[in-house]
Structure formats: structure tokens, C-alpha cells
Image (spheres, rainbow, N blue to C red):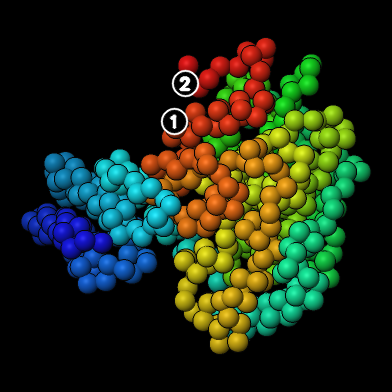
């Protein structure tokens, strides 16, 4: 990050803090406004003193967001003009934090540097804000619990090595079966009719450390189905992201009005383990990235196995011949694993994918968590080995390369972009799309939607006789 960029970010934060402090002291204001103004000034100083602190952009972004309710509280004693100015200052703090995040990012040479703008700053601000929530809400183990997790991980690595899963990760994934009993129930959401699908998972007890604990949880697989009547159509499996699995979120990410009604796909939307109706607690996704390596390994392996069983059911019971996969973020990670295990897929698209969990942990996890493994004698390389059975980079794709696709945001602040670049090279992709956006902006990027249309058209999944029109038309 250049010195003028640090000075600009620091100056904007400091100026915003001083102006808010003047407003707060001119008229007796809630003490929160005074404290927030002081913290904004401190945040500006941090951009000068420690610009490399990895939580810095998340910290100042959250400070800007906090400014919104604090500004609204000022309406009790301040004129509306003061409140509007305070809101404007809060927006400035959020946007300048987003721009600062863009400027200080270190990208691999293979990733095109995005052009900084206020719009991109806003997109990155949203990424940093959500990432701050993700990190603060994770329940990484402490004390004796952390020691047990490390001890279990050490034994888990030993057994993974003995079974040859490090050298050949594909062997870790059990063969799929056609579910023997499938339940389908009609449902609707905002006038969209679909079917709820469920069956008891065929995922076996792997007899690994943590397996009995994992198998004690409910093993019901759930998915949603949109199926056209009449002639056979191509199927699209839509795999959601982390902390999703809820209808309002999933139907925004995979809009049925476009994918089902306009493009003509039959849709199947599986819910990943620990998410949505398969969650363990009140929040979707809890327990996946909370620092327990055994649970993380079992969750991903079962998610992949359940989806392979769904694919087997589509082929057996629905006569599906043309099946495509589209996954975003954590769903893109699962899509990439399916590309290494299911050779008959017509198209696999990994969008903004989480590619390498080890790199993500090293980037975002608390240092004390990683230090605990090192103190127990487990190196970073060994931690990487532990996760090889669920690494798309550790297995060659079995789907023909021309049927694969990757799209990612050059300004992504939630998943590391370096491993995405590695996956592009691993899959030898020449037409991968790097869009000038962030992780959360992917759904609103016209370039991404046009690129998806082109990918499916090239794969022969879109037909004119189904009254399909390009999104651009």
C-alpha cells in the first residue's frame, strides 16, 4: 500500500472523526457519538501505523456501520441537518475502508488488478463487513477443548495416511448409491411451486476419529426440486454457499425465474450438511468452520456423497442425461470436488469458489488456533495433508476440461483468490472469468450472468426450441 493511499484513508477517517466529535460536543449528544468519533480517529491512525493488520479493514468497516444507528440516535437532540451529516460521515468511513482494502491487497500475478472506484469500494466494504461477522461468530475451541481437537486431528491424520488418502484422495470418497426411499412433497414460496425432496443419507460410518460423534446427528438429506412437465430437460444442480440453505437467500442466488422459467433447466437444490434444515443450532452453518477438523472433514465428505447419490437418483429415476453443476463459494468448493469424482457431468461451474480450506484458515483463523497445532507438533504441511481428501487441488478433474468453468471476483475479500488462480491452472482453464467485483457482488454482475449463459450454451444445454433468450437480449 503506497504512502499516499495510507495518508488518504487515514485522513478521511480522522477528518470524519473530528467532524463527528464537533457535532457531538456542539450540542449535548449521546456519549456513544463522542466515543465513536474518538474510535474513528484512532482507526485513522491505525491505517498509518499498522496498515498490514489483517483485521484492519473489517474493524474500520464495522465502525462505519455502527455510525448509522449512532447517527440516528442524535436526532433526539440535534437538527436533521446534523443527523444527515453524521450519516454521510458514516458512509464515508465505510467506503474509504473498502478502498483501503483494495489498495492494500496483494494479488498473484495471474489475477488482474481491479480498478479502484467508489462502486468497487462499496462492494468490498460489504465483503469486509460480512467477513468480520463470520470471524467474530465462529466458535474456535479454547483451553481443554482445543487440546482435544488437536489430539483428535493428530490421530485423524495418522489414519488418513494409513489408508492412502494423502496420495490418492479420491479413495476417501465412498461410491454413491441410488437412495432407496425418496420422499417428495409439494411446496410453494412466494407463488413459486416446487417440491421438497428428502431421504436418509447413505453416507457410511468411516470409522475415523470423530465419526461416531458425526453419525449421531440427524442423517436426513434435503433438497428442493423444480421440474418441468413434458419432454426431458437438462438438469442443473445448484449448490449454495456458507450460512445459506434458506429459501429467501437460495432463491436470490439461484433465481428460478431465470434458471427454470427462462433458460428451461430442471433444478435440484441440495442443502449442505449443517445448513438450513440440516443445521445443528439456530444459525445455518454453525459447526463447519469452528475449528474442529474432524467435523469439517466429515461434513464436506458427506455433502459430496449426498449430492452424488442425488445425481444417481436423477439418472436412475428421472432419466437425466444432461446434468450441470453450479456452485457459489462453499458450493463452488463442492462443485470442484464433484468435477474430480463424477465423470458424466455435462458442465461444472465453480463460482467464487472456496478452493483451499487450509489457506482460508491460515488467512482468517485466530493465530492461537493455528499455534495450538504447531505446539502439538503438527506443521502447516501436515495440516494441509489432513485436508487433502477434500481438496480440489489434490485430485485431477475427471470431467473433460472444456466442460469446466471458473469465475471469481478480483476484489474478493471472503475467499482467498490465490487458490482460485491455482485451480484455474489445475483445470487448465483459458476462459475463466475474473470480474471486477467482490464475493457478495457476484449475483449483481452482468458480466457473470452473460458468461454463465455462454458456458451453458457452449455445453449444448440451452436449446432454441425451449424459448430460451439470452439475458443480454
Nearest the viewer among 430 and 132 is 430
The spot of residue 200 in percent (x, y) is: 84, 49
Q: Confirm or deny contact between disc 2 and disc 1 (CB under 8 A).
A: yes
Residue lying farthest right? 180
On the rendered structure, is 346 left or right of 29?
Answer: right
Graded by Cα atoms within 10 Å as few (under 14), some (14 to 19) or many (20 or more), the crowding at tag 2 reads few
Screen quadrant of the N terminus = bottom left
Q: Report the front residue among 139 and 229.
A: 229
Give me the residue at 56% from left, 66% from top.
358
Residue 436, quarter of picture: top left
Q: Which residue is drawn at 55% across and 52% down?
A: 425
Which residue is at 69% across, 41% downward?
400
Give the residue at mark 2: 472
Residue 291, x across and y down, in percent: 59, 70
The answer to whether residue 272 is seen in the rendering is no
Q: Is any part of residue 232 visible from this angle? A: yes
Q: Is mark 1 on a helix, strand or loop?
A: helix
Residue 446 circle label: 1
Which residue lies at the image location 69% right of the left edge and 47% below the top edge?
339
Amino acid at each position: 500500500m503506497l504512502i499516499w493511499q495510507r495518508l488518504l484513508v487515514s485522513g478521511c477517517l480522522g477528518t470524519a472523526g473530528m467532524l463527528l466529535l464537533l457535532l457531538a460536543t456542539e450540542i449535548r449528544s449521546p456519549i456513544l457519538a463522542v466515543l465513536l468519533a474518538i474510535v474513528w480517529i484512532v482507526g485513522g491512525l491505525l491505517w498509518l501505523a499498522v496498515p498490514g493488520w489483517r483485521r484492519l479493514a473489517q474493524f474500520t468497516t464495522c465502525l462505519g456501520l455502527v455510525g448509522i444507528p449512532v447517527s440516528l440516535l442524535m436526532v433526539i437532540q440535534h437538527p436533521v441537518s446534523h443527523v444527515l451529516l453524521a450519516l454521510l460521515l458514516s458512509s464515508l468511513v465505510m467506503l474509504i475502508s473498502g478502498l483501503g482494502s483494495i489498495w492494500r491487497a496483494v494479488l498473484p500475478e495471474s489475477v488482474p488488478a481491479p480498478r479502484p472506484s467508489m462502486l468497487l469500494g462499496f462492494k468490498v466494504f460489504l465483503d469486509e463487513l460480512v467477513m468480520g461477522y463470520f470471524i467474530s461468530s465462529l466458535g474456535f475451541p479454547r483451553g481443554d477443548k482445543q487440546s482435544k481437537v488437536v489430539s483428535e486431528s493428530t490421530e485423524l491424520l495418522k489414519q488418513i495416511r494409513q489408508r492412502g488418502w494423502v496420495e490418492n484422495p479420491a479413495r476417501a470418497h465412498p461410491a454413491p448409491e441410488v437412495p432407496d426411499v425418496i420422499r417428495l412433497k409439494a411446496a410453494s414460496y412466494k407463488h413459486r411451486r416446487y417440491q421438497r425432496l428428502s431421504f436418509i443419507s447413505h453416507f457410511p460410518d468411516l470409522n475415523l476419529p470423530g465419526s461416531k460423534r458425526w453419525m449421531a446427528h440427524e442423517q436426513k438429506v434435503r433438497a428442493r426440486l423444480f421440474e418441468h412437465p413434458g419432454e426431458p430437460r437438462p438438469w442443473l444442480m445448484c449448490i449454495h454457499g456458507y450460512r445459506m440453505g434458506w429459501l429467501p437467500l437460495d432463491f436470490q442466488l439461484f433465481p428460478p425465474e431465470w434458471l427454470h422459467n427462462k433458460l428451461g433447466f430442471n433444478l435440484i437444490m441440495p442443502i449442505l450438511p449443517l445448513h438450513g434444515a440440516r443445521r445443528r443450532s439456530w444459525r445455518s452453518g454453525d459447526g463447519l468452520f469452528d475449528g474442529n477438523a474432524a467435523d469439517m472433514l466429515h461434513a464436506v465428505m458427506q455433502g459430496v456423497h449426498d449430492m452424488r447419490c442425488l445425481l444417481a437418483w436423477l439418472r436412475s429415476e428421472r432419466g437425466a442425461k444432461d446434468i450441470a453443476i453450479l456452485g457459489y463459494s462453499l458450493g463452488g468448493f463442492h462443485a470442484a470436488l464433484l468435477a474430480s469424482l463424477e465423470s458424466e457431468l455435462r458442465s461444472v461451474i465453480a463460482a467464487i469458489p472456496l478452493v483451499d480450506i487450509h489457506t482460508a484458515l491460515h488467512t482468517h483463523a485466530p493465530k492461537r488456533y493455528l499455534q495450538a497445532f504447531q505446539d502439538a507438533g503438527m506443521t502447516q504441511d501436515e495440516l494441509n495433508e489432513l485436508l487433502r481428501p477434500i481438496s480440489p487441488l489434490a485430485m485431477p478433474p475427471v470431467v473433460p476440461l472444456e466442460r469446466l468453468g471458473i469465475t471469481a471476483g478480483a476484489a474478493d475479500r471472503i475467499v482467498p483468490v490465490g487458490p482460485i488462480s491455482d485451480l484455474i491452472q489445475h483445470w487448465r482453464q483459458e476462459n475463466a472469468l475474473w470480474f471486477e467485483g467482490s464475493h457478495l457482488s457476484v449475483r449483481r454482475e452482468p458480466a457473470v450472468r452473460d458468461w454463465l449463459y455462454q458456458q451453458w450454451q457452449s455445453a449444448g444445454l440451452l436449446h432454441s426450441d425451449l424459448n430460451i433468450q439470452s439475458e443480454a437480449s
